[in-house]
Amino acid sequence: MTQPRLQAIPWEAFFEVAVRGVPLGLGSHIQWDRRLDARLAGALMSIQAIKGVEIGAGFKCADRPGSVIHDEVFLDKEGHPYRKTNRAGGLEGGMSNGEEIILRAVMKPIPTLMQPLQSVDIESKQAVLACKERSDTCAVPAAAVVGEAMAAFVVAEAVCEKFGADALTDVQAALTAYKERLAQMW
């Protein structure tokens, strides 16, 4: 269901989680505490050392007009809606829109360096060098695995809220009936 992609560029390190197969309509557009975008962002922000979360085009939206950012809707030959882009990252108005959910999280660098930074001893109030405790150079790969798990928990919880959670067969039946109902709309 999820697949992390790791990327690093010189001035930041981040990971990306892509959640596929999410049904249309998970989350809420009217209840702040059930918005799927907020819940996913909160879950990723809860991971140690994560300093920013982006959904879809995220921060790129800030300096572009809506005509460039919004995902247009088209109809295929059978009259079914589709989109050529996914800048919304699979989430609109707090709900899943049926597209792949794209999440990115930015992680701050590891604080213990091989060349320690200046610090202060809390007890003596004297200047000291910070400790050299870690030998790994990047924690992003480990954080990506945690990010994937956090996204899976949040999406699973949203599925259970929408389709029930007493038994997997009931969830599957409810999901199948929901998809059939949506298909009849188009």
Image (cartoon, rainbow, N blue to C red):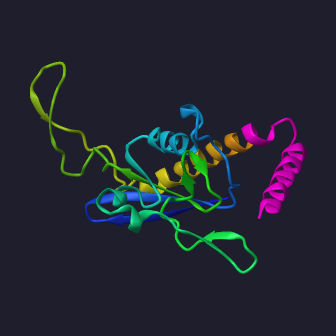
Q: Which residues are magenta?
A: 160-186
Q: Quadrant of residue 76?
A: bottom right
> Farthest residue in the top direction?
123
Nearer-the-camera pick, 157 or 97: 97
- The residue positioned 29% from the left and 60% from the top of the image is 63
Image side of residue 173 versus residue 82, left or right: right
The number of numbered badges drawn on the structure is 0
Most common SS among magenta residues: helix
- The residue positioned 37% from the left and 47% from the top of the image is 52
Whole-percent x, y for residue 29 in the image: 58, 41
Q: Is residue 165 magenta?
A: yes
- The residue positioned 46% from the left and 41% from the top of the image is 47
Whole-percent x, y for residue 19 in the image: 61, 58
User: In the figure, 28 relative to 55: above or below?
Assistant: above
Nearer-the-camera pick, 104 or 60: 60
Q: Which quadrant: the N terminus?
A: bottom right
Nearer-the-camera pick, 143 or 32: 32
Whole-percent x, y for residue 60 in the image: 35, 61
Q: Which quadrant: the C terminus?
A: bottom right
Whole-percent x, y for residue 36 in the image: 58, 44
Q: Is residue 97 magenta?
A: no
